Amino acid sequence: MPALIFLLSIPACQTMGTGMMLSSWATSSIEEVAEAGPKALRWMQLYIYKDREVSRQLVKRAEQMGYKAIFVTVDTPYLGNRFDDVRNRFKLPPQLRMKNFETNDLAFSPNGNFGDNSGLAEYVAQAIDPSLSWDDIKWLRRLTSLPIVVKGILRGDDAREALKHGVDGILVSNHGARQLDGVPATEAMCELEKERGDKDMVIIGITEASGEEKFSVIDALPEIIEAVEGKVEVFLDGGVRKGTDVLKALALGAKAVFVGRPIIWGLAFQGEKGVQDVLEILKEEFRLAMALSGCQNVKVIDKTLVRKNPLAVSKI
């Protein structure tokens, strides 16, 4: 199943009329995914390698195969300390390899002697350029005419800097909360509601009885939206589990959301059909949430649907 994640997902995305972002490190190649979903909306996620020719070739192949945008990851100069991976002695299945690369050192074989970890940290240290800067966005801009979206922005000042360097969009993301302790968490929005005792659509930075504050990725969204002033599109990933989560994100200014774990759950349950089922559920829940919020179309979704503090609610 792991080797088929993208090849099973893209037909479902094509059927449902939604897009899919392909990782540079995917276990299926740029060309294989394009062939599996020729009419699907496809985007390419990009890491900037020390050898810029590696990144250049990925971009050119994506262009040739009809991918519509480049999402360049900016939050991974090194791999974060993934303590759960260490505790669980997580390792990738030995038969897997990154199919977008031909040489063994770039394709990454998990067969290496990496002790109790997956070996990805060693791979990143060896191959990915930690000196990534805004000049690399300029380089990428000269390289391609495709829209460039920076993935991994969580602060308004970084969003403004991205605008200065000509990006076409921003993906508010914390990389699954696996890169740095203390960043806004990837926590299902529905779970945040339960913990906060919210009776409203979404509460931002509500202080709990313990005096601590719970922040999710969506809490970073308003600052980014304010910073870009409508000049570029802003997307969000992290914590989206229900159609109401989609509505919250759009109400706070996101153009669209990305989902990851629900897709994996669908794949584990029933392969391609499981992915389609997940997308159908999210779509129908979103439609229902819109209807119950009085929204006839997505154009009328705005921040008036979201309250920053909970309303008083009778417990009778």
Image: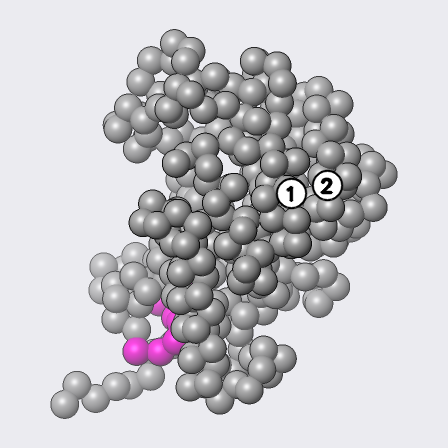
Colour scheme of the rendered structure: one colour
- Spot the residue most to the top: 113
Q: Residue at the spot x=39%, y=47% of the render?
A: 271
User: Where residue 10 appears, x then y in whole percent?
Assistant: 54, 49
Q: Work out whether 195 lies above or below 150.
A: below
User: Where residue 253 appears, x then y in whole percent?
Assistant: 58, 69
Q: Earlier in the sequence, mark 1 or mark 2?
A: 1
Mark 2 surroundings: few (<14), some (14-19) or many (≥20) residues within 10 A: some
Residue 200 on the magenta segment? yes
Q: Is residue 136 visible?
A: no
User: What's the amino acid at mark 1?
Assistant: Ala
Q: Work out whether 158 lies above or below 219.
A: above
SS of the residue at dot 2? loop
User: Where residue 15 appears, x then y in whole percent?
Assistant: 55, 60
Q: Work out whether 189 lies above or below 267.
A: below
| Residue under pointer 1 | 34
Are dots 1 and 2 in contact, CB under 8 Å?
yes
User: What's the amino acid at mark 2?
Assistant: Met
